[in-house]
Amino acid sequence: MKRYGQILKIVPGKEDRYKELHAAVWPEILEILRKNNIVNYSIYLKDGYLFSYYEYFGDNYEADMAKCAEEPAMKKWWEQCVPCQKPVDAAKENEWWAQMEEVFHMD
């Protein structure tokens, strides 16, 4: 299992819409994530930033994420979410959610 932490900005004025979307995540989105080895997924909002945390139990992260991206339901979900988001300044080229470095963990 590998833990992932990521950060993204929220577009000012879109906080309520983003919360509304995630208060009722489509069941097919949850199934796609589970099917592609993502569990224990949380997103937090603070001062214009979104922080996500999840655990990945697969053996080919890039392939599983590519499978998620090809799902029609996921594409429709992102059509709803992306207008609420923007990358942080430190994001790498073509990186939406910027990967964070884990510096501490306690079980």
Image (cartoon, grey):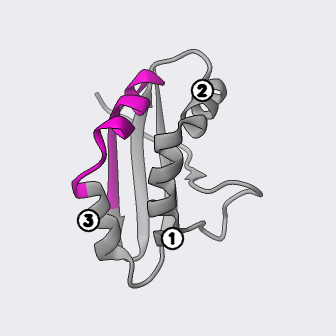
Evaluate if marks 3 and 1 touch, with contact meaning CB atoms under 8 Å apart.
Answer: no
Q: Mark 3 and mark 2: span between their CA atoms?
A: 29 Å
Q: Name the residue type under label 2.
A: Tyr
Name, please, the residue furthest toward the left.
Answer: 23
**Position in image of residue 22 (x %, y %):** 29, 56
**In the picture provided, is 28 more to the left or to the right than 4?**
left
As helix, strand or loop, the secondary structure at mark 2 comes to: helix
Residue beneath the point at 38% across and 39% down: 29
Mark 3–mark 2 CB contact (< 8 Å): no
For marks 3 and 1, give the CA distance: 14 Å
Residue receiving disc 3: 20
Of marks 3 and 2, which one's residue comes earlier in the chain? Answer: 3
Label 1: element kind: helix
Q: Whole-percent x and y of residue 36? A: 48, 24
Label 3 amino acid? Glu
Q: Amino acid at mark 1?
A: Pro
Does the magenta run of residues contain 10? no
Q: Residues within 10 Å of mark 3 (few under 14, many from 20)?
A: few
Residue 83, numbered label: 1
Query: Where in the figure is residue 76, as x and y percent of width and height?
Result: 48, 51
* Tag shown at residue 61: 2
Q: What residue appears at the point 74 percent right and 55 percent down from the top-left corner?
A: 94
Question: Cα distance, mark 2 to mark 1?
Answer: 25 Å
Residue most toward the bottom? 13
